[in-house]
């Protein structure tokens, strides 16, 4: 649905060059919620703004719903008719909502329809329908200044949906909101994704956002995507930074002659008593250093950090047993060995 | 001079002043609003970025604005004559008044429009809006309270200019003050003229502030401009927010 290839953005100011995007290849499938996560300055914001060409990429291409937007852009700095038409089919929500303070809630939602040239009656019908969808039908005549942050973002979302977009871009939509409101806005985005089949590309610096609504995720660092994939693929990737961040477990080894491993359970593996089987089969004592169960992308996932007696070489067989059970094993602090083991 | 002698004089002078100021304000708004918006749009990073155009407009505005009005008025005499057929009277005064006020108002418009949150411009661009949509739906309506304050400032400045125009035969309150107060030592009439001017200016200022506040009260909270204005509003902050 959204594909970027070799997307590069270099900012030039007074002879200095800053590379915000360095050859980003992103592929967002139709109907999924895709999260791009990274620290500030990683290039997330440039990336999402290049998707609807609010920012002109220095090199590379962007295509949304089969249209090559970079080809529509033309050469000048101004957006031509075709690019503007393509933009009207891409909804966007912003961190600071960007609602017009001089207009009522309903008039804000009608704005994209005014731009599309929809008739007055149709505009107000559509706007009220959308406000109903986001649960704000009673605020149609209010001004943005009279709303709370969460309500403003709901208006922002209703406005983004006015042009019947297939794609919604979310630029840190929940970063200015408190945790409670964040949850309700994420829930709304999830519902819209399911009900309308809306493809959502969101950028965020909050891991919780990815955890609660994303089907796929990408980690950005220094203008590059360093990891990407569906959330379950990522969780199944040994040594994945994103997986570890999505699902942190703590705990240190109690001595040098111990082996610490992280066990990740997904799906039905989560329900089998593998640890007690391991203990009985090999007659070893297992200490649990840390453990967590959570729902990631709608799936039950568990992660446990356990300690086995003896160094890694002595534990090759028990670790092999766990792998046979369909569990994902990361040996902590022995990354080289893990990679050998994976071969 | 008795009150019955003064009254018709003052009445006529009042109307002349309002007539000159009214028309020149209208022309200043019609000319200055697009000029001010253009100054923002053509600036570096603006929607119609054009450094040369920006520099040229900026220079013209600066020179015209810093020109002492009385000199501008004299310099424009032949131009005024071409347009109105005369250089005397209230119609003739409108020409230099308007030309002096256009750059004055344009700079105020520029400042007001610059304060509109760029995020709003981006939001409209993301919806597929063009530059004209941005101007019409965002820049003007979002800065409207500031624009009204700017227009009020311009009206008050024009009343001041019109008094100068009065000295060279434009009529109005300035003319009365000069001819009767300064040349004939009619101190009474002069003080009354001063009082009338004070009342007129106060009424205009009050009306302008009131309109700006009314417009602003419903808005605010979504950009730099409203926040700055809230600070200025001081004790009304609670109500406005």
Image (cartoon, rainbow, N blue to C red):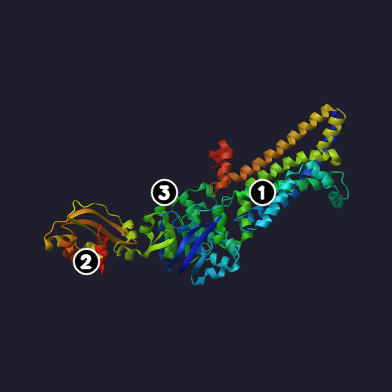
Report which quarter residue A337 is drawn in. Answer: bottom left
Viewer-nearest residue: B240 or B173? B173
- Position above or below: A262 against B74: below
Marks 3 and 1, how far apart at CA:
37 Å
Percent across and percent down for residue A228 are: 38, 64
Closest to the camera, between mark 3 and mark 1, is 1
Same-chain check, marks 3 and 1: no
> Disc number at residue A149?
none
Closest to the camera, between mark 1 and mark 2, is 2
- Position above or below: B142 against A161: above
Viewer-nearest residue: A137 or B102? B102
State if disc 3 and disc 2 touch (CB < 8 Å).
no
Q: Which residue is mark 3?
A: A178
Q: Secondary structure at mark 2?
A: helix
Viewer-nearest residue: A108 or A267? A267
- Position above or below: A194 against B40: below
Q: Which residue is mark 1?
A: B109
Closest to the camera, between mark 2 and mark 3, is 2
Characterize the local packing of mark 1: few (<14), some (14-19) or many (20 or more) Cα atoms within 10 angstroms.
many
Parent chain of label 1: B
Viewer-nearest residue: A6 or B104? A6
Q: Secondary structure at mark 3?
A: loop
Marks 2 and 3, how far apart at CA:
41 Å
| Residue B105 located left or right of residue A343 | right
Parent chain of label 2: A
> Disc number at residue A323?
2
Disc tally is 3
Parent chain of label 3: A
Instruction: Name the residue at the front extreme.
Output: A15
State whether residue A210 appears in this view.
Answer: yes
């Amino acid at each position: 649905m959204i594909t970027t290839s070799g997307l590069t953005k270099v900012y030039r100011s007074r002879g200095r060059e800053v590379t915000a995007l360095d050859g980003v290849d992103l592929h967002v499938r139709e109907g999924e919620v895709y999260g791009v996560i990274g620290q500030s300055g990683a290039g997330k914001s440039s990336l999402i703004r290049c998707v609807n060409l609010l920012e002109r990429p220095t090199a590379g291409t962007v295509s949304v719903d089969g249209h090559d937007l970079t080809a529509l852009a033309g050469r000048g700095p101004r957006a031509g008719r075709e690019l503007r038409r393509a933009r009207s089919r891409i909804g966007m929500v912003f961190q600071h909502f960007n609602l017009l303070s001089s207009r009522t809630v309903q008039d804000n939602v009608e704005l994209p329809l005014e731009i599309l040239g929809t008739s007055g009656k149709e505009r107000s019908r559509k706007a009220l329908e959308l406000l109903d969808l986001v649960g704000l039908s009673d605020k149609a005549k209010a001004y943005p200044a009279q709303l709370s942050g969460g309500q403003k973002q709901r208006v922002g979302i209703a406005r983004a949906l006015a042009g019947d977009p297939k794609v919604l871009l979310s630029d840190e939509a929940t970063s200015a909101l408190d945790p409670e409101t964040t949850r309700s806005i994420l829930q709304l985005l999830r519902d819209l994704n399911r009900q309308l089949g809306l493809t959502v590309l969101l950028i965020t610096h909050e891991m919780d956002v990815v955890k609660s609504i994303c089907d796929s995720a990408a980690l950005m660092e220094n203008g590059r995507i360093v990891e990407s994939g569906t959330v379950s693929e990522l969780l199944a990737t040994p040594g994945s930074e994103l997986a570890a961040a999505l699902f942190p477990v703590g705990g240190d080894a109690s001595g040098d002659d111990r082996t610490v491993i992280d066990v990740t359970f997904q799906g039905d593996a989560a329900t089998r008593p593998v640890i007690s089987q391991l203990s009985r089969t090999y007659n070893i004592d297992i200490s649990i250093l840390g453990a967590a169960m959570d729902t990631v992308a709608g799936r039950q996932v568990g992660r446990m950090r356990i300690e086995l007696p003896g160094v890694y070489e002595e534990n090759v067989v028990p670790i092999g047993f766990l792998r046979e059970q369909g569990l994902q094993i990361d040996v902590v602090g022995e990354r080289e060995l893990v990679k050998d083991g994976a071969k | 001079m008795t009150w019955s002698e003064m009254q018709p004089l003052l009445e006529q002078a009042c109307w002349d002043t309002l007539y000159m100021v009214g028309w020149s304000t209208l022309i200043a708004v019609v000319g200055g609003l697009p000029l001010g918006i253009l100054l923002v749009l053509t600036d570096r990073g603006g929607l119609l970025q054009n450094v040369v155009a920006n520099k040229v407009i900026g220079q013209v505005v600066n020179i015209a604005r810093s020109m002492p009005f009385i000199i501008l008025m004299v310099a424009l005499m032949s131009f005024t004559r071409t347009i109105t057929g005369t250089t005397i009277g209230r119609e003739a005064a409108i020409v230099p008044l308007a030309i002096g006020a256009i750059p004055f108002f344009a700079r105020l418009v520029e400042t007001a429009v610059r304060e509109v949150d760029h995020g709003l411009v981006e939001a409209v661009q993301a919806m597929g809006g063009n530059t004209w949509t941005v101007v019409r739906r965002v820049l003007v309506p979002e800065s409207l309270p500031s624009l009204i304050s700017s227009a009020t400032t311009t009206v008050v400045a024009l009343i001041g200019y019109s008094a100068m125009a009065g000295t060279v035969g434009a009529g109005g309150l300035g003319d009365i003050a000069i001819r009767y107060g300064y040349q004939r030592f009619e101190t009474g009439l002069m003080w009354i003229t001063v009082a009338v001017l004070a009342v007129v200016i106060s009424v205009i200022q009050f009306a302008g502030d009131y309109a700006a506040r009314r417009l602003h009260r419903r808005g605010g909270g979504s950009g730099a401009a409203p926040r700055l204005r809230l600070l200025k509003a001081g004790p009304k902050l609670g109500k406005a927010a």
